[in-house]
Amino acid sequence: DADLVVLNTCHIREKASEKVYSELGRLKLMRDRRREDGSDLMLAVAGCVAQAEGGEIARRQPAVDVVVGPQAYHRLPDMVARAATRRRTGAAAEIDTEFPEEDKFDHLAPDLRRRRPPAAFLTVQEGCDKFCAFCVVPYTRGAEVSRPAQRILSEARALVARGVREITLLGQNVNAWNGAPVEGMGPGLGGLIRALAAIEGLARIRYTTSHPNDMGDSLISAHGAVAQLMPYLHLPVQAGSDRILKAMNRKHTAADYVAVIDRIRAARPDLALSGDFIVGFPGETGADFEATLALVEQVGYAQAYSFKYSPRPGTPAATMGAQVEEEVKTARLQQLQALLNAQQIAFNRSKIGCEMDLLIEKPGRRDGQMVGRSPWLQAVHLDAPADSIGRMVRVAITGAGPNSLMARLLD
Ligand code: 5AD
Ligand code: SF4
């Protein structure tokens, strides 16, 4: 029954990107059926595929009416209105992949955009200046830009006033945040987190995603000093071989990464880690891959994402020699994921018998069951009253599966 379908797209790997076109094919058939009925369906493509491919999308799939990049979302209503007028005349699609001067956040409602009460995301930073050799983000999302602390703090206060108890600060390079501070605030993300922690009613703070080289002293010490900052950190390393890290232009070694983690763990001993890994980067040998496995063994992850290297147009790695064969990538990914899954299960099991605070987020599948989040971002199922959503409760962990825990309420 929709009048407009917006596909919000990801360009990070080829698979995600190609899915857009198969999805558009299906939607075009739907649109054709709607037109036979005398109604209509408008199609918009948003996100990083829109940013990267622009007008090419409408050429490849002429049913598309609107193509809008991530920095121009606030223009979507106008674009839809113009496209609605123009399509009667059969004119071309509306395309906007600019990085406009005006700040889109000024035009979008304070961050109730991606609300998942009682936990919410708050964008504090966008873009990336790192240019890892495999990655499209610096091209699709542009240079690093930090939002001013004042805006972030007032949006956070508005969220908390609406019942949000947990805020995850978002940015492609969130720990490179260097926005304008408010008076009396310390520098960088560590300073921002300390300022947020002063908001009454905000029980939990998280941030994602971080680069190891931007883990500054003030941020590391915040992990020990700020009780609301949760002991869970997504800190991608991508690979364990220094040769590959260099080819990836990561600007750190495996030992640098481990040293950063040691320092954060010294500040916050119960810290759990999550990471991202790429297997089969051009030139990766069996020995390089073994170094990734060894690093995973050494660090120990509570959770992780891992991917086969996917050549992306316009990135330096896409044209490097010694691209790794698909079968080799598949085998390496399986081996790495087996190790990461085993670590995740072991981490979950290590919580059995522990007491902890949960933030109740939503009803579970069964009647009377609720789902909460542990400090380590694990989903936890428990029997609890239906009106407990948004409450912090004390529980004992009674069981653990690969992807979630079971708990019992303590009074
Ligand atoms: N191929 C595979 N994985 C990639 N990532 C980024 N670019 C690529 C690529 N070309 C992964 C990285 C990053 C995560 C968001 O996606 O691990 O941290
Ligand atoms: Fe991409 Fe992250 Fe590297 Fe930036 S730091 S280029 S977003 S992988």
Image (cartoon, rainbow, N blue to C red):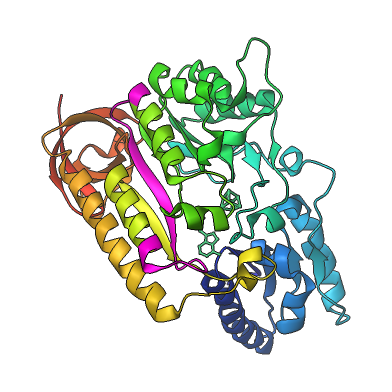
Q: Is residue 258 visible?
A: yes
Which residue appears farthest toward the top when viewing the image? 184
Residue 206 picture location, percent across and down:
45, 34
Residue at image coords 26%, 53%: 403
Q: Decide: is 43 above or below 400.
A: below
Residue at image coords 56%, 35%: 214
For residue 375, which quarter of the picture?
A: top left
Residue closer to the observer: 348 or 118: 348
Residue 112 picture location, percent across and down:
58, 40
Residue closer to the observer: 10 or 223: 223
- Would residue 206 be found to the left or right of residue 36 on screen? left
For residue 376, which quarter of the picture?
A: top left
Q: Is residue 276 magenta?
A: yes
Q: Is residue 130 magenta?
A: no
Residue 247 picture location, percent across and down:
56, 58
Which residue appears farthest toward the bottom when viewing the image? 36
Residue closer to the observer: 51 or 276: 276
Q: Quadrant of the C terminus?
A: top left
Residue 149 picture location, percent across and down:
66, 25
For residue 1, which quarter of the picture?
A: bottom right
Q: Decide: is 399 above or below 283.
A: above
Q: State how many labels appear.
A: 0
- Would residue 167 be found to the left or right of residue 64 on screen? left
- Would residue 108 be found to the left or right of residue 379 on screen? right
Residue at image coords 29%, 37%: 374
Q: Decide: is 224 above or below 288.
A: above
- Would residue 253 be found to the left or right of residue 150 on screen? left
Q: Is residue 202 visible?
A: no
Magenta-colored span:
266-288
